[in-house]
Image (spheres, rainbow, N blue to C red):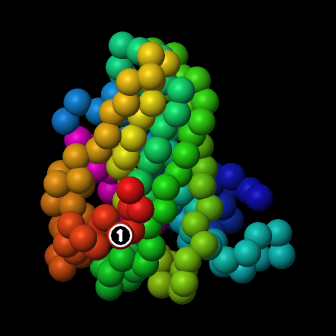
Amino acid sequence: MLSISQYIEILGNPNPTKVIAQRDCPVEITKYQAIYIPDLESDPEGILHSIAYTNVSDAKVLAIKFGIAAFDIFNGMLDKFSGFAIEELDVARSATNEWRQSSCSPWMFKTLGTGVVYLDAVRFENNQFWYADYGEVLKEMQRIEEGLTRDDLKDKIGR
């Protein structure tokens, strides 16, 4: 599989994206890109998401769960999944990860679809946890798909 920067070189501009910021996030999402990948010899059709992030807390992070969603060309939610980074991330350190999303009709994301990412959960070295405020997340996601409800978001989040 190619990296997102390689796909962008081949396919052109990435899709529009949105990072949902929340109060007191221990991990800052510093860059987010998403791009539709057509069915290629080397890769099946799907959506590739790339997230760069930094530990801005005062404790070492052991695992991160990102909420990642794709909205189609008509601003309807195509699909939502969790991207996991199970790695030690020291204070003030940064990392980048990529996740491939398979969904029904990923071609509906092509060019005009919007990728959305937010911090869902963090586990620290001291066995403490941080969790997303789904009220804030839902409010921001409703700016794209007005009809989303908290129940819709919970179903798609699976927690």
In the rendered view, tell whether residue 124 sits above or below residue 108: above
Q: Position of residue 94 (x, y in %)?
A: 51, 26
Q: Which residue is mark 1?
A: 155
Q: Quadrant of residue 69?
A: bottom left
Going 38% across and 82% down the picture, which residue do you hit? 73
Q: Is residue 150 magenta?
A: no
Q: Position of residue 132 (x, y in %)?
A: 29, 44
Residue 47 left/right relative to 148: right
Segment colored magenta:
15-22
Image spot of residue 114 (x, y percent) = 38, 68
- Would you call the spot at circle 1 few (<14 residues within 10 Å), some (14-19), or many (20 or more)? few
Give the mark count: 1
> Amino acid under label 1?
Asp
On screen, residue 76 versus residue 87, left or right, reads: left
Residue at the spot 60% in from the left edge and 55% down from the top edge = 99
Residue 136 relative to residue 69: left or right = left
- Quadrant of the rendering where the C terminus is positioned: bottom left
Question: From the image, which quarter does the N terminus lie in?
Answer: bottom right
